[in-house]
Amino acid sequence: MDKTTLEKIRSEFPILNEKIYNRPLIYFDNGATTQKPQCVIDRINYGYEHLNANIHRGVHFLSQRATEAHENARKAVCDFLGADKREEIVFTRGTTEAINLVAFSFGEAFCSEGDEVVISVMEHHSNIVPWQMLCERKKMKLRIIPMNENGVLDLEAYKNLLNERTRIVSVMHVSNVLGTVNPVKEIIEIAHARNIPVLIDGAQAVPHIQVNVKELDADFYVFSGHKIYAPTGIGALYGKEKWLNAIPPYQGGGEMIATVTFEKTTYNELPFKFEAGTPDYIGSTALAEALRYVQEIGIENIAAYEHELTEYATKRLMEIENMRIIGQAEEKSAVVSFLVGNIHPYDVGMLLDRLGIAVRTGHHCAQPLCDSLDIPGTVRASFSFYNTKEEIDTFIEALKRVIGMLS
Amino acid sequence: MNMKINEIQDGIVEEFAQFDDWMDKYALLIDMGNSLEPLDEKHKSPQNIIEGCQSRVWLNAEYNDGIITFQGESDAILVKGIVSLLIQVLSGHTPDEILTTELYFIDKIGLKEHLSPTRSNGLVAMVKQMKMFALAYKSKKN
């Protein structure tokens, strides 16, 4: 990415002008949430100023306009993921809700006592707990794919975990702690050879790499809007039509029904069957704008530039004595997790914050992963295309200063 | 109001007031954390642990002759510094003294952010736990 493009991009994110303790903000917590470009902020305002009316219900003009915008947003998500049909896209509050939806509804339709669910050791709590809840409800067993010391999943062990009781596999595309890009295509192929469907948690993938659900042949693919420059509270579930038709609704209410009598309710068709209540049509249209924005920059360009940033940050971090990079897979996305000697991540994070640098510290909602590595957590710098090498240099200088204070 | 405890609080406020720069304040806090007497391994029991999302705090209390003595530790040094301060202020007093104390020193020394509930570092829970010990010993005494 050349300097002019980068400057233009940075100028589109108003929050990057913020001062933290009188220092310019350096935001390296993009894995937690991304900042919003002006066009997305404008789109939210536009929504309330020009198209606010409840959708799918009104006979009036404004409701039609809002409905159209919401359905166009569905089409935008569908195209973005490379899906065939807009009916296969369900809007959710985010990744967490999407996984809960599948864990509940798929569980109701296809799981019973003694069955098994396979996840991996590096999962975020949001891809562990919903399955644990299903396992408790149905007296099932959770099986865990292990990884090696570099943070790469052990596919041989994975193959051996699958058996005739395995009902579903659910793994993350990109690790939020290690940055590992998992070989999800292969993971899906292996499961499909045994007719087992697979859910892919794409929360950390879609902002950074090109995703095509058809190419992957994923049965379910989920992501959050706020991690890809859209507002909080909107996300999406892609599900193959055959699966979405085969599983029952998750929540009941308005919008998701065909007819209601006190004796029997019949459900609406896809995707509305899974969208009970008034959907976040302001959020969905802003999500579509965010997707348009990243596609305008180009996911390929984003991936290449973020790779450059990640490599550069890793190289500079390695200058520091007793530096330990957590997660050394060959295929990595825009995340660098690290520990320095015996210094606690919290101490590093608190002091970096005083220097205007926002990183995440702790177990990153992946406690089992940290336990398996026998670490209390990590300091994590996660990048976006609006970050710069100069920011990384400032971060390294600040980090050296902080380490000096703490050792 | 508790004069004895407030005198200690004021002393700490004064100690920190000699530094303008936050770096120096933090350096002092780190020193305090480093000089905190390590908690005996036997007291690092699951029942003495206060889990924060970010760091862990252990707190042990003993009650002798009407006086509560606290010992504590944390795996993070900045948290340990605050633990050390809290112990300086609250350890060695009667349950009544501890219960009637309003902790104002943290705010005054400009380290309030560490006691913000949103940091989830176990410190807010620690202060609560110290008061709970005082309350428990007080009712035991009665």
Image: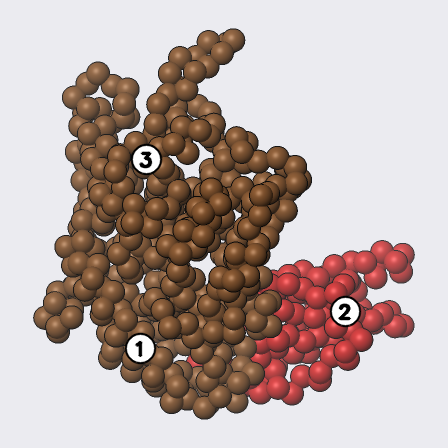
Chain colours: A brown, B red
Q: Which residue is mark 1?
A: A311
Residue A373 in view: yes
Q: Label 3 is found on which chain of the structure?
A: A
The number of callouts visible is: 3
Q: Residue at x 71, y 83 (%)?
A: B38
Residue type (three-letter) at the residue carrying disc 3 = Glu
Q: Residue at x 72, y 70 (%)?
A: B59
Query: Quick one: label 2, few (<14), some, or many (20+) residues within 10 Å?
Result: few
Q: Is residue A236 left or right of residue B32?
A: left
A321 on left or right of A230: right
Q: Residue tagged by mark 3?
A: A88
Give coordinates of residue A383: x percent, y percent.
Answer: 31, 68
The type of residue carrying mark 1 is: Glu
Residue A146, compared with residue A290, is above or below; it is: below
Q: Position of residue B97 (x, y in %)?
A: 75, 66
- The residue pinned by badge 2 equals B45
Image location of residue A244, percent across then percent down: 40, 32
| Amino acid at pointer 2 | Ser
